[in-house]
Amino acid sequence: MGNRVVMLVDFDYFFAQCEELRNPSLKDNPVVVGVYSGRTEESGAVSTSNYIARKYGVKSGMPLFLAKRKLDGTDSVFLPVDHEYYDQISDKIMHILSSYATTYEQVSVDEAYLDVTEQVEGRFEKAKDYAQKIKVDVKNKVGVSFTVGVGPNKLIAKIACDSQKPDGLTIITPDEVTCFLSPLPVGRLLGVGHKISARMEDIGVKTINYLASVDIQKMVALFGKAFGVYFFNAARGFDNEPVQETGEAETIGRMGTLKEDTRDISMIMEKIDEQIDDIYREFILKNQSFRLVGISTVLTNLSGKSCSKTLDKPAKDKETIHKAAFELFEKYLAEAELEIRRVGVRIGNFTKEEPNQKQLTSFFQSS
Ligand code: DCP
Ligand code: CA
Ligand code: CA
């Protein structure tokens, strides 16, 4: 099989850029978009800010009063989040992006993977012009700028994208993968947050290059099988995950508030199992299989996050949803610092395929 050419598109300072779009006079000021919790006028957290505000040290997740303090004496503008408006802009851009790819996978309101292998005939030399063309098209039609990372898989595309923002375009060819990854801190790998990178540092592993020298047994002993194997592959830039559609319409999900804010997995799973019962009732009517299980959380600072897992093969049973959701929460809690307020679970990637039918693609991937 030839090379894949995978792009990750990540919209620049997204919520704040949307605000600039409808009010261009903001462009020269520091702009902060925040979630106001309502307790006092200044309580709440920063969702994002434009790059002018970032120069003063404003960061996502920071308390609003602190952002105000950092921007003291400037013509800063503070605005409350308007998700409905950002979703509209996001939908417009996503619609355009999807027309440029064979398969496209939206991962959040401001991020999507595009498999453009066919469009550039598998040639990275062509990826630059192609990405530029998409950037210009979206800028003309919607007025929003974004950053692109291009690589032979999703893992590399993501890290490439993060390496130069805003309005960036970074292309990493298969030949460049090792050099590109080697000097980077392990924290740049998806799934390596503060806690895991601290554990890696404890054993002297700081860079990806060093991580790649740890043998697989040691990796598994340290991080468990799933994580160990993932890190082993990721450190080498290996990633087989396909870019696949996960359209909103094609998922069944539930979201709800926990009895109390918590980080206790059994309490979380109690809520999730109720939701799974609900989802399952809806799912069996479809008479199909699912291949994706996802979870979402809202933390005590009101920031939200979701992640998902693609199963090795399609499944039809409730237990698989429970197991995958449990694993996702376990992984998530290992990284999350704050307590969780709301949780949700969803399934998707529905197919008519029978769960026990051996898929040729997964057969080739595992052999
Ligand atoms: N967001 C949020 N709370 C956070 C982080 C992000 O509400 N703690 C929201 C606001 C962001 C959007 O999600 O605009 C996308 O997040 P990104 O991490 O991609 O950040 P930005 O798009 O704002 O900036 P960048 O230019 O760094 O991508
Ligand atoms: Ca993003
Ligand atoms: Ca972004």
Image: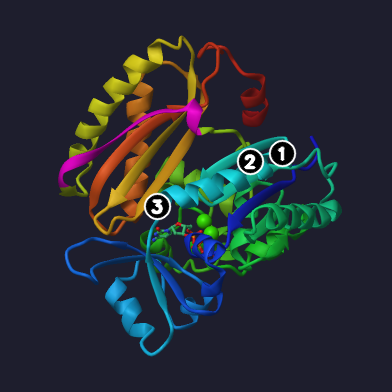
Residue designated by label 3: 222
Residue depicted at x 51% and y 54%: 190
Mark closest to the chain's N terminus, 3 or 1: 1
Q: Is residue 255 magenta?
A: yes
Whether pointer 3 and pointer 1 mark residues with C-beta atoms closer than 8 Å, the reply is: no
Describe the element under mark 2 as helix, strand or loop: helix
Amino acid bearing label 1: Ser
| Front position in the image: 190 or 132 | 132
Amino acid bearing label 3: Leu
Say whether residue 237 is visible.
Answer: yes
Task: Give coordinates of residue 112: x percent, y percent.
Answer: 59, 46
| Front position in the image: 314 or 63 | 63
Q: Is mark 2 within 8 Å of ligand 3?
A: no
| 35 versus 104 height, above or below | below
Residue stretch rendered in magenta on the structure: 248-260
Whether pointer 2 and pointer 1 mark residues with C-beta atoms closer than 8 Å, the reply is: yes
Task: Give coordinates of residue 256: x percent, y percent.
Answer: 25, 37
> Which image quadrant: the N terminus?
top right
Instruction: Indicate left or right for 207 with 100 as reference.
Output: left
Say whether residue 189 is visible.
Answer: no
Mark closest to the chain's N terminus, 3 or 2: 2
Task: Give coordinates of residue 263: x percent, y percent.
Answer: 22, 49
Q: Is mark 1 within 8 Å of ligand 3?
A: no
Query: In which image quadrant can residue 275 be found?
Result: top left
Q: Which label is found at residue 99? A: 1
| Front position in the image: 360 or 276 | 276
> Which image quadrant: the C terminus?
top right
**C-alpha span from label 3 to label 2:** 43 Å
